[in-house]
Image: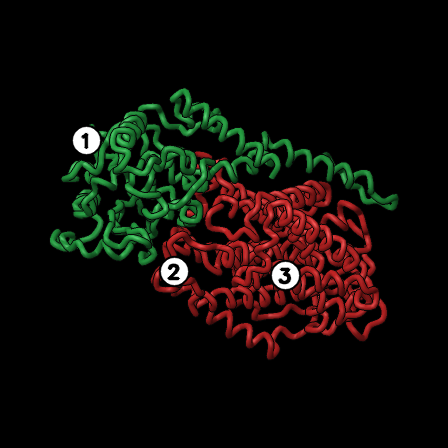
Amino acid sequence: MTLDRREMLRLAGVGCAALATGVRPADAAKEPPGPVAPDAFAVLVDTVACIGCRKCEWACNVENRLSDAPAESFDDLKVVDTPRRPDHDAFTIVNRYRTPADHDHSWTVKLQCMHCVDPACASACLVGALSKDEDGPVGYDAWKCIGCRYCMIACPFQIPAYEYAKPVEPRVRKCTFCEPRLDEGRSPACVAICPNEALTFGTRQELLDAAHTRIQGTPDRYFPHVYGEFEAGGTCWLYLAPVDFKYTGLPALDEKPIPHHTERIQHAIFKSFVPPLALYGVLGLIMHALRGEDGHQETHRG
Amino acid sequence: MVKHHHHPKPVTTRFFSRGTLVLMALALAGGSAYLYRLIFGLAAATNLDNQYPWGIWISIDVASGVALAAGGFTTAALADIFHKEKYHAIVRPALLTAMLGYTFAVIGLLADLGRYYNVWHPMLPSMWQGDSVLFEVGICVIIYLSVLYIEFLPIVAERFMGRVNLPGPLRIFNRVVDSWLTVCHQFLSRFISLFIVAGVVLSCLHQSSLGTLMVIAPTKVHPLWYTPTLPLLFLMSAIAVGFPMVIFESILASRSFKLKPERELLSGIALYTPVLLAAYLAVKIADLVERDAVGYVFEGSVQSVMFLIEVGLGVVAPLVILLSRRARNSITGLFTASSLVIFGVALNRINVFLVSYTPLYPVKQYFPSPLEVLVTIGLISTLVLVYRAMVMIFPVIAAPPADAPREVLVTAPPAEPKGATS
C-alpha cells in the first residue's frame, strides 16, 4: 500500500530516467532483472501496415503443426471481422477493430504471446515449466507441467490456452516465438511470410528505435505510443497502431511487471527463511514458558 | 501425555444410519463423476475454458477446504502451545478434521490438475521455483499434511499398540506393525511438540499464501477483493473460522452419536471468535478505505452483492450473535453463529477465486457443470463418512454419552465397526 505507492513512484522515476538516457528500463531498474539481454529477439507489429491477409495464421499453423485446417480455409478473410482469441490450435490470430465513432475506418491486429520481459506465467509456474529464455522467447516444457493452469490466471494478456479435451498429456499451448527457427538463425514463420512487412524481426532495442523513428517520421499515420515498450514491464512483441491502443484489443496495463505484485510479498515472507523460523522459535518459547506445573516432560527445542 | 476430563475413546454407534446411506449414495455418484473426469478429460467433465481456467474444484474443494481445516492448527495452538489445558478435549477431533480436510483438498486438486500424475513434481529440487506462490503453497501443504499424519500416529498407537490383529494372512505382520507403533509412540511422546509447533507455522505460511495466489492477477480480480493485504486477510479469516468449525462439528457429532455436547468447552472457545472476527473485519474495512474501494461495495454488481452477503451474513452477523452471552451459552446460538462464520469464510474463498475473477475476453460466463458439482458433493460426503468411521475406530471424541453423567473407564476396546470403506 504505502510501500507499494512509493515503489510505483520509484519505478516511474526509473522509467523516466531510462527514457531520458535511452537505457532500457529492465536494465535500469535493478529489480529482479528481466533476464533479457539487450540483444534479445523481438518483433515489431505495425498494424498500420497489416492488411489482415491471415498468411501469418497459416504459416504458424503449418510450422507448429497445430490443426489440419486446409490451407484454403485461411483465405477466408471475413473471419477477422469477428474477434477471436488465440487457442490451443491457433497460436496467432488476426482481428479487425474499429473505433465506435468511425465505422469506415478499420485496422487489423495480430495477436499472440507477447513474450514479456518479466513474464507473469513463468513467475506463477510452480515447477518452472514456463521460463524466460534470455534470447527473448518464453518457452514451455510440457514434461515438467502438472496442468494447474495458474499461468492462465496470471497472464495479463490472457494468452495461454489449454488442451482441455485431452484426458492424458494435455498441454498449455501458446506461441513459441518459433524457437527452433531462431536457433537456426531464421525469423519466426509469421514474420517470414508477412507480405506487407507489417512484422519486423530484430533485437528489442533495434525495433524500439525503429518504432519511434516511424512515429516521428510520419506522425499523422501513427498513434504516438509503442505498445509493449513499458506495458507490464515490457514485452518482446511491440506494437504500432493508427489509433489509441484501447481500440486494438490489447489490454491497458501499467508499467509494473506483474510478478512484482506477488514476488515482493513472497520474498518478504520467505527471506532466507528467517520469518518462518522466527515464528517457530517464538511459538516454541511460548509453549515452553507456559508449561503447567503439573507439566508433562515436554522436551521442546525451539 | 495430557490429562483429560474425559479420555477420548472410540464412539460406539452403528455405522449405518439413514444419513450414512444418503451420504454413501452421494459419495458413489461423486466417485463415478471423478472417474469420468479421469477417463474423458476436463473438457468432457467441466465447464472450464481458456477464459475461466479455475472453477469450483479450486475455489471450493481446495481453497475453502483448506480454510475450513484451520481448526486443526488453531486448537493445537490454543491447547498445546498456549496451554489452555481444558481444551485438549477438542484437539483430536480438530486434528482429524484437518487431516481429512487436507487429504480431500488434495484429492479435489488432483481432479482439477491436467496432469494429476505429475503432482509430485514440485518435490523435485530440479523443478523448484521459489518465485512461485503456488510452489510455496504446494510444498507447505505437502509438509503440513505429513505433519498432520504424524500428529495422528499417537492416537493410532494408543488404540492398537499391544493388540495389533491384522486380518487373514496379514497377521504375520502383526508383530512388525506393533513394534513400529511402539517406536512411533516412544519417539512422538518425546518429540511431538516439535511437530505441533511446525504444524502451526506451516499453517500460517500456506493459509496466507493462498491469499497471495490471486494477487498475480491485478487486472482480473475485482477491486473489492484485489489487495496486497489479501494474504493477511486469508490468514486472519482462517484463524477466525477454526473454532467455529470445531463447534459446528462437535454439535453435529454429539447429535449424530447421541453424546452429551461439551457445551461449556464450546462456549469457552466461542468467546475468542467475536474478537478474531472483529480484528478481521477491521483490517478488511481499513484496507477498503485505504484503497478507496468503498464505493464498489454499493455499485450494485453481482460482485458487490456477493461481497455484502459475505461480510454482512458471514462476518457481522455471527460477530453480533456471539457478543451475546446467552447465545454463546446455548447450543442453538453456538450452532447458528458457527454456521454463519463457516459460510462467510467459504464464500470469501469462492468470491476471491471465482466471483471476483473477470476474464479479459470472456466468451461465456462460467457456471459449474453438473459433474463438477457432483464431484464436490461426493468429496464432502466421503469426507463425512470417513470421519464417522475414524471416530468409531480411533479414540478421538472425548464427550460422554448423553445419558452418562460420569466418565466410566473402559478397559476393553469396543467392538470395531465394519464397512467403513466407500
Shade of chain A as shown in the rendered figure: green
Residue at the (29%, 55%) spot, across then down: A83
Q: Is residue B229 above or below residue B13?
A: above
Q: Which residue is mark 3?
A: B344
Q: Give the secondary structure at mark 2.
A: helix
Q: What is the quadrant of residue B33 in the picture?
A: bottom left
Which kind of residue does numbered mark 3 sit on? Answer: Gly
Return the mark for residue A99: none
Q: Residue at x 77, y 57 (%)?
A: B269
| Mark 1 chain | A
Sequence-first disc among 2 and 3: 2
Q: Amino acid at mark 2?
A: Leu
Q: Nearer the viewer, residue B321 or A246?
A: A246
Neighbour tally class for label 1: few under 14, some 14-19, many 20 plus, Cα within 10 Å? some
Write down the residue under mark 1. A186
Q: CA distance from mark 2 to mark 3?
A: 32 Å
Circles 2 and 3, Cβ within 8 Å, touching? The answer is: no
Determine if marks 2 and 1 fall on one subunit.
no
- Could you say which is closer to the camera, residue A147 or residue A106? A106
Residue A144: image location, x then y, percent: 38, 42
Q: Position of residue B378 (x, y in %)?
A: 50, 67
Residue B38 — which label?
2
Helix or strand or loop: what does disc 1 sit on? loop
Classify residue A94 as left or right of residue A230.
left
Q: Chain of mark 2?
A: B
Identify the secondary structure beneath mark 3. Answer: helix
> What residue occupies the far left of the structure in this picture?
A72
Query: What colour is chain B?
Result: red
From the top left corner, tell me how far across and down residue B195 is, in percent: 67, 43
